[in-house]
């Protein structure tokens, strides 16, 4: 007898062929969700790495390099050994030993690192008496001699040649940079007579002028004197200035230098910024500590053969400052990530629940015919995995392509988590619903369904955990170990609100059913009755409401954060300029300049002010910042800008004192309400007219007086030194041209743009906006899934009612009125939870570092509610729900009634 063959087709192939549309929808959902999930950690890694690299690159190389300085060998070392330790060969060997002792991830950049010898040791140079050198204040210039490695590779000779290896005890060759030659009048062939430590005169011949190939690199900028001469100040009062410059020698001249001056060997190790990553920040700090304070210091001292070797660097402070900034930014970004992730997870759960609900009769039939839970679950998992795994892999690859940079492992983990959830939802939902065999469908609307004890315990457990976490957050704050709670706060608030609202919302609807039944027409009564019974199951109601509440809360929180950032930057820019634009002169501005500025395109009003710094208190111990203004015009400006508005009449002179608008710090100087100042040889008495925290003309400490009253008191007319401008679309180029030379022009818009140049700020803000947008998209999808689940029943209901004479207009009204209670519930609940989340997090969340990376330590900007962010998303939910209901009614009218009224149909 021939062997029997299996009469059934494979389960997975049969299901995919039977429902290709559902498989395609699942594929797209998993693809989109896994792509977003994988892109998020990569985007965070990218902006954090870029922010760290720019934070290091923006600092002066003198602060970022690892400075190793050693004392020259003493007399206790034999002459031959001492000279050997000062040769270029020894310095090169020590350089490689120092670089080899560094612990990763601190990696040296050999192109910008350098080593050599400096003479004389210390910060002071050697004064040179040559009469042809410039002498500001009559002081001789000061030169420091450097025998630094790699000069030929880092410089281009523009005149003459590089110094050679012809150094003697009385003659040296050196080069200078083009900037040094220009400012100190040095030419190729010039000879400097430099006194040695033992009073001999060393003739230093300038053989060439060089131009740095990379002036901003660490080779030239780690010691700024190498590249550019400096005007240094003496310690006298008043201070005098003199030139300080560098002479560049061949490294072979180190022995000759050591015979004439006390020398100092040095090694400058520049970090390779391209290798810095934010995730290695703790290891990088540990590596620096190892070399600067730990066992690595012993290795450095062994390499330099000097126990007096010092290792210093400002890089550690830079890393700490960046870490603090990232610590302030991360909790804010995490709020959007947790909120969007929660909504995406809810959408996956709802999609699986919708699929399980559509196939309820199929699973019930399998169970009634002996199908085991394990067998059904295994087949459903395989059926979903065939679609979800390729979609997740493709989403991961798409995220890698769209977001270059970042670690692959967190992205792969995030995409894998999405795939796992998508594969597990359908079998878990089906097995939970069919644990026991059911003989018939059971009614599950909230009008009759009673929560099980298990569900009640689960809800109470979640509520207790959520409330406990919120209370802990309120008590600890975001800055005291509460970062995780800060990120979870909107989700926790949404969970609490969803459970409470799902339990409560049918009650008022049921109370309205009776009164509406006595009205004319059955549409209102029927819609309220159906909304109160909500046949979508309690679990689905909680999920859909949780998705909407979390998305609305995240959107409201995100809108408030973004509005707070914009407001902080706008206010900081306004404080910096005092108006829309500011023109400051080095002295009094002429009437022609004021006239040209008034006629500049975009300028509305011009408020002159005379800023004076010669106002001294009577005992001469302190100078105070004072501005003389026209009270009426200045009062209008203060009201327009919102910076310390006051009544112009308050500055009207009366009696022998001049009224002044003062800052709180200045008000403390007024004894008995009066302050005497010395100005132009006269005593000027001021009294406090009003106290304001801010004012347009001056920042922080200020005294504002009437310009005419001040002129009468001092006998000198006041001429404006500053112009404060208001207007829209001020032409920056035309304003600079009108102001002319000798003035400083600052625009509020330019100051505003200066606050957003950090990759950490722009990256975090961009990710926040993208996360909020993605959360809104998933929330819309959750709403559509909730409506799609009830679509078959609604279509069947409309078909039956149309046979009873229901018009299309009445059908549209019925569906809209049925959907509105839940939509209004979600909108109101979302607005309230958003407001609660903002109120909850505001005391412990500082937006200042996200808005202004270089803000002062005492500057704080707390989160505040943005009304538009609360209202607009909530209104969008209501509009969307009404729109979908209208489309469903329109579609039902086109389809006709035959399909929905088939014989044997049950609902």
Image (spheres, rainbow, N blue to C red):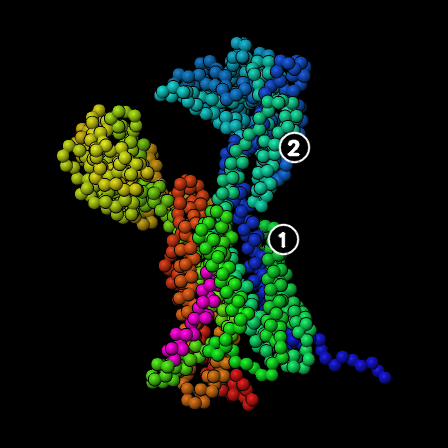
Q: Earlier in the sequence, mark 1 or mark 2?
A: 2
Residue 510, position in %: x, y?
Answer: 40, 77
Q: CA distance from mark 1 to mark 2?
A: 30 Å
The residues colored magenta run 493-513
Q: Is residue 148 magenta?
A: no
As displayed, is residue 609 above or below residue 251? below
Q: Residue furthest top?
A: 199
The residue wearing badge 2 is: 101
Disc tally is 2
Quarter placement of the N terminus = bottom right
Residue at 56% in and 68% down: 349
Q: Which mark is residue 753?
A: none
Q: Residue furthest right?
A: 1
Residue 862, position in %: x, y?
Answer: 40, 49
Residue at 45% in and 25% down: 230
Residue 39 visible within the image: yes
Whether label 1 touches label 2, CB < 8 Å: no
Relative to residue 514, is residue 130 drawn left or right? right
Residue 630, position in %: x, y?
Answer: 21, 40
Residue at 59% in and 43% down: 280
The residue wearing badge 1 is: 409
Q: Residues within 10 Å of mark 1 (few under 14, many from 20)?
A: few
Main SS of residues in magenta: helix
Is label 1 in a helix, a strand or a loop? helix
Q: Residues within 10 Å of mark 2 (few under 14, many from 20)?
A: some
Relative to residue 100, is residue 2 drawn left or right? right
Relative to residue 252, is residue 700 drawn left or right? left
Residue at 74% in and 81% down: 7
As displayed, is residue 251 above or below residue 333? above
Residue 813, position in %: x, y?
Answer: 39, 79
Is label 2 in a helix, a strand or a loop? helix
């Amino acid at each position: 007898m021939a062997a029997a063959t299996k009469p059934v087709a494979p389960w997975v192939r049969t299901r995919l062929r039977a429902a290709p549309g559902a498989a395609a929808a699942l594929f797209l959902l998993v693809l989109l969700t896994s792509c977003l999930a994988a892109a998020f950690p990569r985007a965070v890694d990218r902006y954090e790495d870029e922010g760290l690299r720019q934070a290091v690159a923006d600092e002066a190389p003198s602060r970022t390099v690892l400075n190793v300085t050693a004392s020259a060998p003493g007399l206790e070392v034999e002459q031959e050994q001492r000279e050997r330790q000062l040769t270029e060969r020894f310095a090169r060997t020590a350089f490689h030993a120092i670089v080899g002792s560094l612990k990763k991830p601190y990696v040296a950049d050999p192109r910008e690192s350098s080593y050599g010898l400096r003479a004389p040791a210390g910060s002071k140079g050697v004064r040179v008496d040559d009469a042809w050198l410039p002498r500001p204040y009559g002081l001789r210039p000061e030169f420091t001699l450097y025998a630094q490695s790699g000069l030929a590779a880092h410089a281009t000779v523009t005149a003459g040649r590089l110094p050679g290896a012809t150094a003697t005890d009385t003659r040296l060759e050196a080069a200078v940079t083009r900037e040094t030659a220009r400012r100190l009048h040095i030419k190729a062939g010039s000879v400097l007579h430099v006194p040695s430590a033992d009073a001999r005169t060393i003739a230093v011949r300038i053989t060439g002028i060089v131009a740095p190939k990379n002036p901003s690199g660490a080779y030239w900028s780690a010691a700024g004197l190498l590249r550019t001469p400096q005007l240094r100040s003496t310690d006298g009062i008043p201070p005098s200035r003199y030139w300080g410059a560098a002479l560049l020698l061949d490294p072979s001249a180190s022995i000759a230098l050591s015979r004439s001056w006390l020398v100092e060997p040095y090694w400058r190790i520049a970090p390779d910024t391209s290798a810095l990553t934010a995730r290695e920040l703790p290891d990088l700090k540990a590596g620096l500590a190892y070399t600067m304070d730990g066992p690595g210091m012993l290795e450095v001292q062994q390499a330099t053969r000097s126990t007096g070797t010092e290792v210093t660097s400002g890089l550690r402070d830079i890393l700490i400052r960046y870490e603090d900034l990232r610590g302030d930014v991360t909790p804010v970004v995490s709020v959007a990530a947790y909120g969007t992730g929660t909504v995406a997870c809810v959408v996956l759960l709802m999609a699986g629940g919708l699929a399980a609900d559509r196939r309820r009769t199929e699973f019930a039939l399998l169970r009634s015919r002996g199908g085991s839970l394990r067998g059904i679950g295994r087949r459903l998992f395989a059926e979903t995995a065939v679609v979800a795994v390729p979609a997740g892999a493709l989403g991961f690859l798409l995220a890698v392509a769209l977001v270059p940079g970042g670690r692959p492992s967190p992205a792969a983990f995030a995409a894998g988590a999405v795939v796992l959830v998508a594969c597990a939802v359908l079998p878990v939902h089906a097995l939970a619903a069919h644990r026991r065999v059911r003989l018939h469908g059971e009614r599950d609307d909230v009008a009759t369904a009673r929560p099980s004890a298990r569900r009640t315990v689960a809800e109470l457990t979640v509520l207790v955990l959520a409330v406990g976490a919120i209370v802990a957050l309120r008590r600890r704050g975001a800055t005291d170990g509460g970062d995780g709670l800060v990120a979870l706060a909107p989700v926790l608030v949404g969970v609490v609100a969803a459970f409470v609202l799902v339990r409560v919302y049918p009650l008022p609807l049921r109370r309205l059913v009776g009164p509406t039944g006595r009205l004319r027409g059955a549409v209102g009564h029927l819609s309220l009755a159906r909304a109160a019974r909500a046949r979508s199951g309690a679990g689905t109601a909680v999920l859909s409401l949780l998705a909407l509440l979390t998305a609305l809360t995240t959107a409201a929180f995100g809108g408030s954060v973004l509005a707070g950032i914009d407001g902080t930057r706008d206010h900081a820019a306004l404080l910096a300029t005092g108006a829309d634009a500011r023109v400051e002169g080095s002295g009094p501005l002429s009437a022609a300049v004021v006239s040209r500025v008034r006629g500049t395109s975009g300028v509305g009003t011009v408020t002159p002010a005379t800023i004076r710094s010669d106002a001294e208190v009577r005992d001469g111990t302190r100078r105070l910042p004072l501005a003389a203004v026209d009270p009426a015009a200045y009062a209008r400006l203060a009201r327009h800008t919102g910076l310390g508005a006051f009544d112009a009449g308050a500055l009207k002179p009366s009696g022998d004192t001049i009224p002044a608008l003062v800052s709180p710090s200045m008000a403390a100087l007024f004894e008995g309400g009066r302050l005497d100042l010395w100005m132009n040889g006269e005593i000027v008495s001021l009294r406090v007219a009003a106290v304001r925290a801010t004012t347009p003309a001056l920042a922080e400490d200020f005294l504002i007086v009437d310009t005419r009253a001040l002129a009468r008191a001092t006998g000198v007319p006041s001429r404006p030194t500053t112009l404060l401008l208001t207007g829209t679309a001020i032409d920056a180029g035309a304003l600079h041209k009108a102001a002319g030379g000798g003035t400083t022009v600052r625009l509020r818009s330019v100051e505003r743009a200066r606050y957003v140049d950090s990759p950490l700020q722009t990256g975090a803000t961009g990710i926040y906006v993208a996360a909020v947008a993605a959360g809104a998209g998933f929330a819309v999808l959750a709403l559509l899934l909730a409506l799609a689940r009830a679509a078959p029943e609604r279509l069947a209901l409309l078909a039956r009612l149309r046979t009873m004479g229901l018009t299309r207009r009445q059908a549209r009204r019925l569906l809209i009125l049925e959907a509105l209670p839940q939509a209004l519930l979600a909108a109101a609940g979302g607005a309230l939870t958003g407001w609660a989340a903002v109120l909850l997090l505001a005391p412990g969340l500082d937006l200042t570092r996200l808005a202004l990376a270089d803000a002062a330590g005492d500057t704080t900007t707390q989160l505040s509610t943005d009304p538009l962010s609360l209202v607009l998303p909530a209104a969008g939910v209501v509009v969307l729900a009404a729109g979908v209901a209208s489309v469903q009614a329109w579609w039902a009218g086109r389809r006709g009634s035959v399909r929905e009224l088939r014989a044997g149909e049950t609902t």
